[in-house]
Amino acid sequence: MGVALGAAAFLSLPFSALASPSINPNAPLPGVADPHATRLWSVWQSDGTAWLATAAGDTPADGSVIGWRFSAAPDGAASESPGGDLPAFETVCGKDTAASGHKRVAVAVDFGDGDTDAYPGDQPPAQGVLTCVAGTEDATTAQLLATAAKVRVNGQGDVVAVNDYPAKEKGGTQLTAAAPAADGGSGGVPVALIAGGAGALALIAGGAVVATRRRAKPSTPAAR
């Protein structure tokens, strides 16, 4: 009797309730980039244990680690931080101090995941950027990025392309890099020169000590 009642109840349901859920033909397939999703460059600052969201106009202090990430953000928010291991300032920049009035900052750039972040048909650069840059104490995160890579920004100052990626983004104006330190930002010994007769320059001790900048080998951020 119970089985019969159950069968009768099932047969009495509307056909629409028995049909398969409707499929939105415009919805992206799992693991495939959504062509309609908002995509943007977001900027992050390390606190030593995690990435914390910051802004393009912020002015990080000497010894900071800044990360930029291109990602799809369906809700218009910056939801993806740079991938891979969290960089350490000492590893990227060494322990040298910045020149007077300047700061040294480690900058990491993650171009995002080619499957889920890139525009359909676009391909991010094979390698990310991980380098040490120098700039004046008031240099912003965007200006420091422009010291490490070619950067274009829109009228609101938002970064729209880094090293001409994404290729779809053709607008924006090129951002001026942060002014380098007087000794090249390395914190090392600058080339020492003295003036000689008739404006000639002589190298002290018959040689020059060339300042070097310790730069970490660029690494490919881990794919998401």
Image (cartoon, rainbow, N blue to C red):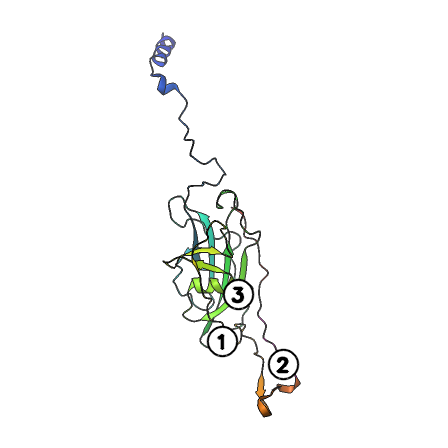
Label 1 sits on residue: 99
Mark 2: amino acid: Ala
Along the polypeptide, which appears first: circle 2 or circle 1? 1
Q: CA distance from mark 1 to mark 3?
A: 14 Å
Secondary structure, mark 1, is loop
Q: Is residue 15 above or below residue 209?
A: above
Tell me whether circle 2 and circle 1 mark residues in contact (CB < 8 Å).
Answer: no
Label 3 neighbourhood size at 10 Å, few (<14), some (14-19), many (20+)?
Answer: many
* Residue 81 pos. (x, y %): 46, 52
- Amino acid type at image mark 3: Cys
The residue that label 2 is drawn on is 208
Count the marks: 3
Mark 3 lies on a secondary structure that is strand
Q: Which of disc 3 and disc 1 is earlier in sequence?
A: 1
208 in magenta? yes
**Mark 2 secondary-structure assignment:** loop
The one of 170 and 217 positioned closer to us in this rendering: 170
At horizontal 55% and vertical 52% (from top left) the residue drawn is 125
Disc 2 residue crowd, few under 14, some 14–19, many 20+, Cα 10 Å: some
Say whether marks 2 and 3 touch (CB < 8 Å).
Answer: no
Q: Residue furthest right?
A: 206
Give whichever of discs 2 and 3 has the lower sequence position.
3
Disc 2 or disc 1, which is closer to the eye? 2
> Is 26 colored magenta in this rendering?
no
Q: Main secondary structure of the magenta part?
A: loop
Q: CA distance from mark 2 to mark 3?
A: 24 Å
Residue linked to disc 3: 132
The residue carrying pointer 1 sits among few (fewer than 14), some (14 to 19) or many (20 or more) residues within 10 Å by Cα, namely many
- Whether residue 49 can be seen here: no
What amino acid type is highlighted by mark number 1?
Ala
How far apart, in angstroms, are the residues tagged by discs 2 and 1? 19 Å
Residues in magenta? 207-215
